[in-house]
Image (cartoon, grey):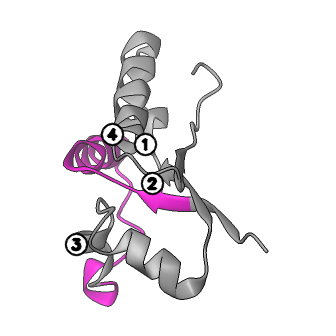
Amino acid sequence: MKRICVEEHWGTPEVAELKAKWLAMTGLSVSVNAAETPLVGPRIGDFEKFRLPLMDESGITLQVLSSGSPGVQGIIDKETAVATARKIKGEICRNGSTRLLARSRSNAI
């Protein structure tokens, strides 16, 4: 039996920077307290050290990854948003695993 996880979050420093800019632009606050989720930060951008071994341990065949919100939705310029989304998806594809897929949160990609 295949076990597939959808909407698994993945991030890079660039995604974190996008979120920080979006929060500053909107005046909203962070919805997750990093002190309450100490394992997320070090693991969110990892493939080999944490994600794939945890998938094996949990019997997960495939993960469909997407960047955390707001991701590229916070980029006003369409061309910049599309280019950034392609770059982020490229990072996932370059990991070499056939067990991780990139999902776009934009219909433009």
Q: Which residue is label 4 attached to?
A: 91
Three-letter code for the amino acid on which mark 2 is drawn:
Gly
Q: Between residue 90 and residue 36, name the one nearer to us.
A: 90
Q: Which residue is label 3 attached to?
A: 42
Question: Residue 42, located in which quarter of the rendered image?
Answer: bottom left
Within-10-Å neighbours for mark 2: few <14, some 14–19, many 20+ = some
Within-10-Å neighbours for mark 3: few <14, some 14–19, many 20+ = few
Cα gap from disc 3 to disc 1, whole angstroms: 18 Å
Residue 86 in magenta stretch: no
Within-10-Å neighbours for mark 1: few <14, some 14–19, many 20+ = many
Q: Which residue is label 1 attached to?
A: 71
Say which label, 4 or 1, has the lower sequence index: 1
Three-letter code for the amino acid on which mark 3 is drawn:
Pro
**What stretch of residues is rendered in magenta?**
8-37
Q: Which residue is label 2 attached to?
A: 68
* 4 and 1 marks in contact (CB < 8 Å): no
Residue at image location 36% in from the left, 17% down from the top: 80
Residue 101 placed where, x, y %? 55, 47
* 2 and 3 marks in contact (CB < 8 Å): no
Say which label, 3 or 1, has the lower sequence index: 3
